[in-house]
Image (cartoon, rainbow, N blue to C red):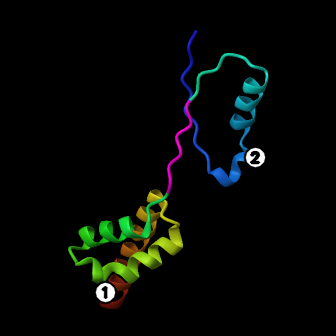
Amino acid sequence: KNLLFVNSFRTNEVGTNMIYSHISKFQHAQLPLKHTWIKLDGLSEGVLNNYLSNLLSLPTRLTTSLSRSVHCKTMGNPLCVEEFLQSLLNRDVDDYLLRYD
């Protein structure tokens, strides 16, 4: 008689999230429902800069402009950061192969 449900959504989309609206209905009807909200924020520019510095084995002063650009493009979302960096790497490799093929 127990159910574990995991849901994720962007906070700017809360109004359109069906699960959120159903949970709200349970709360308003005062039905027993145990739930926990966990909010995950994006990486700050500083944390992202440290990450890129470690990843590239460069001092943070040399990765600052890159981290600003990456943060601007991804808003610090860790998944988006990873995808963006992967796309840069793939593009670089593709450019290299096209140039020297």
Which image quadrant for residue 78? bottom left
Disc 2 to disc 1: CB gap under 8 Å: no
Instruction: Identify the residue under disc 2.
Output: 16
Which image quadrant for residue 4? top right
- Residue at 38% over, 73% down: 90
Residue found farthest to the left: 57
Q: Which mark is residue 101?
A: 1
Q: How many marks?
A: 2
Q: Report if residue 40 lies within the magenta region.
A: yes
Q: Position of residue 75 (x, y in %)?
A: 53, 66
Residue found farthest to the bottom: 99
Residue 90 vs 96, above or below: the answer is above
Q: Report if residue 3 lies within the magenta region.
A: no
The N terminus is located in which quarter? top right
Q: Position of residue 35 (x, y in %)?
A: 58, 27
User: Which range is magenta?
Assistant: 36-41
- Residue at 53% over, 45% down: 39
